[in-house]
Amino acid sequence: MIELDALDVRLLDLLQADASRSNQALAEAAHASPATTLRRVRRLVEAGVIERQVAIVSPQQVAGLTALVEVSLDAQGAEHLAAFEVRAVAEPAVQQCYRVSPGPDFVLVVWAIDMAAYHALVQRLFTQDANVRNVKAYFSVHRAKFEPRVGLGPEAG
């Protein structure tokens, strides 16, 4: 982890709101020089604070379904947890993968084009894995909020 100063926090807040703005526009909004802004953003990228910059596609505007999936394993040794995690993160349909406690071992956020694609994922990831004890899926019928922003300022609580 790197220490973030006020300018870093401002830049991250601005980039999380709109990463498509030019360096000049970002510098103006952050009240910094373009050279300083560019240097700071590069530092944040190199340090891994900014993982990547992407376009966020609205699932409501394209066909498909989102499932929140709880996965419990029979054997929960470190090697078993790591093996399942490697398989889950390699699966393109898995958007997010969390190892959790207590309760299930993993919670996955999965997006599939249709139920047939979801069933194919179930076969690949869960049914063929003898260590998967229980899978519980919840299918989204309405997304009320999705905010990938990480709150860093004083209002973050």
Image (spheres, helix red, strand yellow):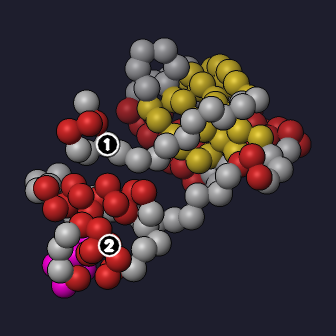
| Residue 112 seen in render | no
Residue 25 image offset from top left, x and y in percent: 35, 77
Residue 114 image offset from top left, x and y in percent: 85, 44
**Residue shown at 24%/58% (left/top)?**
10
Quarter occupied by the C terminus: top left
Residue found farthest to the right: 116
| In this view, 75 is above or below 128 | above
- Compare residues 60 and 2 and report the one nearer the observer: 60
- Residues at badges 1 and 2 in contact (C-beta under 8 Å)? no
Classify residue 37 as left or right of residue 123: left
- Compare residues 99 and 79 and report the one nearer the observer: 99
Q: Which type of secondary structure does the marked residue at label 2 adopt?
A: helix
Residue found farthest to the bottom: 35
The residue at which mark 2 appears reads as 26
Rendered image: mark on residue 151: 1
**Residue shown at 42%/74% (left/top)?**
21
Tell me the magenta residue range.
Answer: 35-42
